[in-house]
Structure formats: structure tokens, C-alpha cells
Image: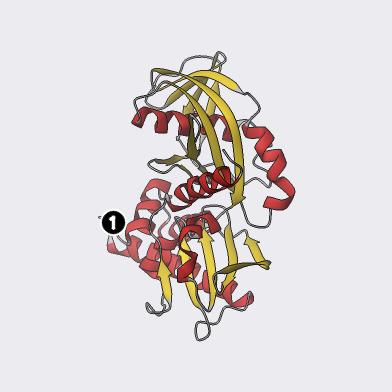
Amino acid sequence: MKNSIIIGIDHGYGNIKTAHHCFKSGVTASETEPTFRSSLLICEGRYYQIGDAHKEFVAAKMQDQDYYILTLAAVAAELHDRHLQEASVHLAAGLPLTWVSTQKEEFRAYLLQNREVTFNFKSTDYHVEFTGADIFPQGFAAVADHLHDFTGINMLADIGNGTMNLMYINERRPVAQKCYTEKFGVNQCVLAVREHVLKEHGTVMEEALIERILRHGTADIDRAYLETVRNTAAEYVAGIFAKLREREYNPALMRLYLVGGGSCLVRNFGQYDVQRVFINEDICATAKGYETLALKQLRRMGG
């Protein structure tokens, strides 16, 4: 839009997602160059290893510089796809549904703290001018471009690593009074799995292995260990539906739409009516939705 590239970024606690990329949201900062440089970002003389782990849950994403550094890495990934090292960028991002109204302006200022920035990511130099940023409701963005499908009463659940965001969409219109944020993300399931495996087998299971089982439903490991993970995941998914019922979810009267990385757990370990529950397994759907919403908004405002 007017020589600016719109780049949508979904700043998750587990992963950072753009329209074409997904990587873990961990940041490890150091004053000296680390041994391994596979995902190294260098900015203002400091070294940041990207993607070693997940970001811990925080009530405000602006409380440290991690999400800003992750934003630079996400922008660089998208520019690399376009064979660009210098560009003007308009950011499109989001916050959990119930946080948007109170944190939107602060998060926008956080993302735009430097109008121009020069940095190096994965041994490539970048110079970026940030021309603006729009902040949208998380989760809703993933379905905003096909609201025509949401006839009748619908519940949208965006299951991330740190939070689960719920929204009612009735007759193609989001209901602002019925938006909820629950601290019941996938990380809660991962912690429960590690605890149960340790209790039942006396072994600490690697998080990467747990995530593989949750994502695919299985792994090449001993059957007893696999059953422990699967049973724990099934309990977590049952907890998801219990949370939904607390918010008046009734499968007989409404349809359920699931987005976010945690939706695969419902697919792999849940019991539900496939005719009434729809799962969007595109983990980048929200980032793509941010770009669509930002483009529409900029067009309405004349760019």
C-alpha cells in the first residue's frame, strides 16, 4: 500500500507466525557472539538467538524487548522471501480479545519505538522504515475475511500456547460483550504431560518430543509412554470443552470454530461432532488475517 509492505505478525507465546513463517518465540540475548549462529539477530551491538524456546506467559507483551526483537526477525523472514534487504513496512498485529481495548495504543507504540532500524538476521543486513502499525483482535482476524459463513450462532475459539480466546459471532457479526480470554493454552497441557510422565515413569520427557506427539497424535516411542501422553492430552481437551461450556457453549444450538496451534489437540485427542465443529489447521491464518484487515483499513482511510 503506497510503497509500504504490509506484514502481519501473530505474536504468540509459543510461536511467532507470519503469513509464510512460524518459529518459536524464545529470545536469548548476549553481549558476545554465540557459538551457533543459525537464527542469530544482531541489533545495536547485541546478539539475540531466536527460537531456542517458547516465551513465558506475560500479562503485557510490552514489558521487555523480546517481542520487538522477534518482530524484527519476523519482518526479516518476510523480506527475505521477497529478495529485499531494505523496505518500508506497515505492521499488522494483534492482542488477545479482552486486552485490545486497554493495551492497543501501548502495543502500537512499542512496535513503532524506532521508525527506522538497521539490523542483521541470519547473516543478512536489513534496513527497515516502519510507516505504521494496526492492532486487531487476536483470533477474529483468522476468520474476518469469510464472515459470510457464520450464519446462526457460532463460537470462535483461538487456542494458543499461553491463552485461549473465545468470541461469539452471531449472524455474521462479532458480539463484543461476549469475548473472553482464558489462561488455558497449550503450555498448560505440556506441563501436565511432563508431570504425568515423571510421576508414572520416573523420566523427564523433552518438550520437543511432547510437542511432536501433541501435533501429530503419535511418535516412535514406547507404547506406555505414548499412552501417558495421549491420556493427559485427552484430559486437557476435555478441559477445553469444559471451559467452553462455562461460556454457554451448546453444540446442539451453535457451531464451534477452532483456530490456533492448539486446535490440532482437539483434532487428535478430542471427542466432538465433526458436523458441528470446524478446525482451521493453518497456524498462520491469524497473521494472514491481520494483513487482510490492515489492507482494508488502509484503503478505507485512503492509504
Q: Is residue 106 left or right of residue 27?
A: right
* Colour scheme: secondary structure
Q: Which residue is mark 1?
A: 219
Task: Determine if residue 190 is in view.
Answer: yes
Which quarter of the figure has residue 122?
top left
What is the secondary structure assignment of the residue under circle 1? loop
Q: Residues within 10 Å of mark 1 (few under 14, many from 20)?
A: some
Q: Residue furthest front?
A: 302
Amino acid at the residue labelled 1: Ala
Residue for point 53% across, 65% down: 157
Residue 283 location, x and y as percent? 41, 52
Q: Residue furthest bottom?
A: 252
Task: Determine if residue 50 is in view.
Answer: no
Rendered view: 252 above or below 238:
below
Q: Is residue 1 left or right of residue 226?
A: right
Viewer-side residue, 10 vs 36: 10
Which quarter of the figure has residue 19?
top left
**Looking at the figure, which quarter contains the C terminus?**
top right
Residue for point 66% across, 33% down: 110
Residue 211 location, x and y as percent? 40, 52
Q: Is residue 74 left or right of residue 213?
A: right
Q: Total number of numbered labels? A: 1
Residue for point 66% across, 38% down: 108
Residue 196 location, x and y as percent? 47, 61
Rendered view: 239 above or below 40:
below
Residue 80 location, x and y as percent? 37, 28
Rendered view: 133 above or below 272:
above
